[in-house]
Image: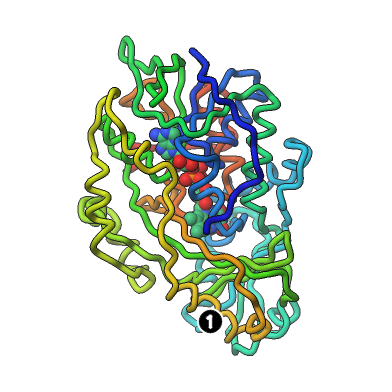
């Protein structure tokens, strides 16, 4: 069963018009809407299912700079600043704690990779540093694994996905945003060569600008408009324990597990070294673009071919404004949990930190992520469709940067000076 966010009383009445329509009520769309509402710009968020029902409630909650490619770090630094002031801004604790993140290394090769990353961000003034074995034990006592070393970023941390999305949505509405659930956007309506509105399953809304923040559905939505966005779906399986005494408040990642403390006293755990790839037509069509990543990561992929291929095809790739769209056929994508990966996650972790042998698993779930070839999101105008801005493809690490990503998207579509230099995120880089 997937986690659910704190309840939000959303609207049911579709407005006839709104300056901006945001397609997708995940954390990125909600943050953009909050930013726009604070600027006094009328904004309506349309969500096909329930708010944050897909990636934004299912993620691990890590907020990190560590491991990001250098061009992606300014967005993460901006996000840190925004997370720090979030409680004041939204009037609620969203579970943000900069308690630190540590990646432990079992082998010299893993340690070398950490050193190389550190060298790649040398000019960015991060507080990341390499640790020796004794320091690992000081920060996270009780491990029985002979680690070679670690890398630690004290200013990284976590927030609670199930608290954050609800609080941000409530704050956006309090500041004037309209949010509607169970309302899929089928397509755009155009006039004089630019966006003039959106066509939903419940009628049309006129607008000047649209932000497409539809997560892994953005590729399909754009495909129907003749625009190509390169993303492929991958599935991660996650578990949460009952409240327990654990080794540390720091989030810890190894090659085959990760854990982080939760606000409820339990831990969120995953098999960090394995992602499930239910093969679809897109994997065949786009595979070549991913070859460099595949060469480095293929050991981490568990492939399956079968039912998903057929169900993906049956969803359809072209539809009209008057026909039922794929977004009405799947309100909330809820991939099956991979029990094998759940077992590996808890076994590998318990072997490294035996205190986890006493853990009680309270919940398991899976989530589907939208991965681009370079693992950077697209936050960009869509040049082929004037009036359309895109914020998608967060590649499994968009929760942490969402406050900044949402703001950057709002900046781009409203012509405001961008929060950071947006060029790494342009759509036309592919
Ligand atoms: C298991 C897992 C672990 C992760 N761990 C981390 C982590 O620790 N740290 C981190 O930073 N990131 C993590 N991520 C990634 C992070 O969750 C995502 O990058 C982020 O939530 C993306 O937010 P989003 O708003 O772009 O997408 P989503 O949350 O997927 O939201 C998109 C929304 O758009 C809606 N939608 C789609 N099409 C339409 C339409 N036509 N009309 C109306 N609505 C539509 C969908 O229903 C959906 O609710 C993880 C993801 C998963 C799945």
- Side of 223 relative to 213 (left or right): left
**Vertical relation: 81 (above or below) 41:** below
Residue 66 shows in this picture: yes
Q: 26 or 272: nearer the eye?
A: 26
**Vertical relation: 9 (above or below) 297:** above
Residue 221 at x, y percent in the picture: 33, 35
Q: Which residue is mark 1?
A: 348
Say which quarter of the image contains residue 152: bottom right
Going 56% across and 36% down the picture, which residue do you hit? 406
Label 1: few (<14), some or many (≥20) within 10 Å?
some
Residue 332 at x, y percent in the picture: 44, 45
- Side of 266 relative to 239 (left or right): right
Residue 123 at x, y percent in the picture: 59, 55
The count of marks equals 1
Say which quarter of the image contains residue 361: bottom right
Q: Secondary structure at mark 1?
A: helix
Colour scheme in use: rainbow
Specify the quadrant that holds the C terminus.
top left
**Vertical relation: 212 (above or below) 242:** above
Going 31% across and 10% down the picture, which residue do you hit? 192
Residue 133 at x, y percent in the picture: 66, 84
Q: 220 or 86: nearer the eye?
A: 220
């Amino acid at each position: 069963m997937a986690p659910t966010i704190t309840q939000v009383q959303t609207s049911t009445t579709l407005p006839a018009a709104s300056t901006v329509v945001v397609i997708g009520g995940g954390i990125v769309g909600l943050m953009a809407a909050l930013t726009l509402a604070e600027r006094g710009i009328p904004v309506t968020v349309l969500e096909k299912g329930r708010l944050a029902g897909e990636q934004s409630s299912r993620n691990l909650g890590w907020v990190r700079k560590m491991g990001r490619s250098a061009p992606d770090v300014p967005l993460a630094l901006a996000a840190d600043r925004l997370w720090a002031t979030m409680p004041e801004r939204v009037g609620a604790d969203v579970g943000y704690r900069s308690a630190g993140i540590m990646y432990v290394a079992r082998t010299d090769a893993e340690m070398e990779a950490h050193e190389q990353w550190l060298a790649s961000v040398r000019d960015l003034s991060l507080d990341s540093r390499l640790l020796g074995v004794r320091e690992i034990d000081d920060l996270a006592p009780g491990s029985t694994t002979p680690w070679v070393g670690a890398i630690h970023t004290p200013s990284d941390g976590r927030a609670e996905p199930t608290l954050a999305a609800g609080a941000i949505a409530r704050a956006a509405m309090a500041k004037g945003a309209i949010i509607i659930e169970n309302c899929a956007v089928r397509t755009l309506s155009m006039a004089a060569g630019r966006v003039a509105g959106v066509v939903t399953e419940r009628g049309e809304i006129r607008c000047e600008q649209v932000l497409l923040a539809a997560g892994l559905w953005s590729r399909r939505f754009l495909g129907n408009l003749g625009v190509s966005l390169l993303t492929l779906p991958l599935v991660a399986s996650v578990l949460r324990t009952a409240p327990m005494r654990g080794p540390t408040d720091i989030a810890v990642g190894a090659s085959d597990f990760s854990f982080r403390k939760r606000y409820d006293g339990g831990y969120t755990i995953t098999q960090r070294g394995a992602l499930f790839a239910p093969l679809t037509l897109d994997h065949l069509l786009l595979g070549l673009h991913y070859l460099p990543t595949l060469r480095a990561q293929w050991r981490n992929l568990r492939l399956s071919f079968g039912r998903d291929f057929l169900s993906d095809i049956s969803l359809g790739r072209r539809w009209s404004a008057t026909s039922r769209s794929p977004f009405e056929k799947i309100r909330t994508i809820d991939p099956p949990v991979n029990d094998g990966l759940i077992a590996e996650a808890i076994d590998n972790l318990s072997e490294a930190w035996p205190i986890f042998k006493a853990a009680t698993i309270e919940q398991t779930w899976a989530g589907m992520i939208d991965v681009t070839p370079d693992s950077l999101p697209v936050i960009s105008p869509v040049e082929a469709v004037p009036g359309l801005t895109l914020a998608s493809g967060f590649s499994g690490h968009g929760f942490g940067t969402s406050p900044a990503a949402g703001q950057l998207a709002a900046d781009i579509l409203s012509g405001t000076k961008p929060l950071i230099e947006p060029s790494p995120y342009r759509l036309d880089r592919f």
